[in-house]
Amino acid sequence: AQSVTQPDIHITVSEGASLELRCNYSYGATPYLFWYVQSPGQGLQLLLKYFSGDTLVQGIKGFEAEFKRSQSSFNLRKPSVHWSDAAEYFCAVGAMEYGNKLVFGAGTILRVKS
Amino acid sequence: EPEVTQTPSHQVTQMGQEVILRCVPISNHLYFYWYRQILGQKVEFLVSFYNNEISEKSEIFDDQFSVERPDGSNFTLKIRSTKLEDSAMYFCASSELDGPYGYTFGSGTRLTVV
């Protein structure tokens, strides 16, 4: 069965510090990988996605993610966090073999301290 | 930037009542989805819809649920007889392409069943 694991429920970082949010997946197919962000009371905004090609992908708001097939991971990074980055971050995975649906991780809540 | 619009943003209903959640997908998108997020839990796939038919549905999407595209612009999710456990945030999404390429999500409808 397809599954997505985000091991960290909460992460707190200082403003200006670097950030890495972890995502591991278990899929019996070539994955399509996504990171979404959800601010309180808001919808899900796509940060970035990976389908193929360069394993380091750039997204909006200064985020990037690296696909590592050998580790089944797609970790999200940002070199310098801003207070406005405080939100919940979801990793999601899809595959052509499983249709159009996405499977989401449980999310990581990011708190930014000043 | 095109948006997926969901109304209402919050709905409170009594147990056993029927509710209809409404969505206006992006106009040139052909594939439509509903996901839900119970408080504190993962975002879960409910159903996908294309060409006026359900293309895929999850185990959650039982006979109490139905979807419809009544007029070529709206996309609705109906819950026939709500239960307490239907309380959740419901997200509508749409996509232009067939495949797990990621979607544009709406901002969600928070349904509270009392």
Image (cartoon, coloured by chain):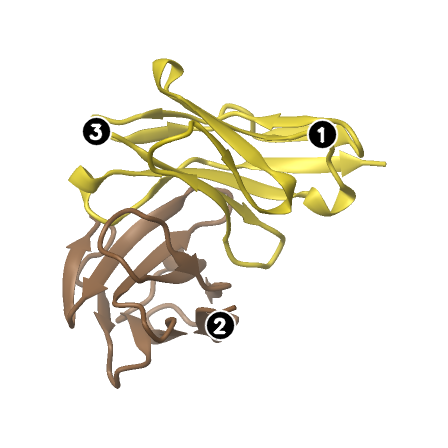
Chain colours: A yellow, B brown
Task: Report the front residue among A110 and B59.
Answer: A110
The residue marked by circle 3 belongs to what chain? Answer: A
Q: Which mark is residue A29?
A: 3
Crowding at label 3, few (<14), some or many (≥20) Cα neighbours within 10 Å? few
Amino acid beneath label 2: Gln
Label 1 and label 2 in one chain:
no
Which is nearer the N-term, disc 3 or disc 1? 1
Give the alpha-carbon distance from disc 1 to disc 2, as whole Å: 33 Å
**B15 relative position to B68: left or right:** right
Say what amino acid the circle numbered 3 marks. Ala
Crowd class of label 2 (few under 14; some 14 to 19; many from 20; radius 10 Å): some
Disc 1 residue type (three-letter):
Thr
Q: Secondary structure at mark 2?
A: strand
Q: Which mark is residue B11?
A: 2
Q: Which residue is at a point 58% across and 42% down the rendered structure image?
A: A88
Say which mark, if any, is on residue A12.
1
The quarter holding residue A15 reads top right
SS for tag 3?
Answer: loop
In the orientation shown, which residue stands out farthest toward the bottom?
A: B71
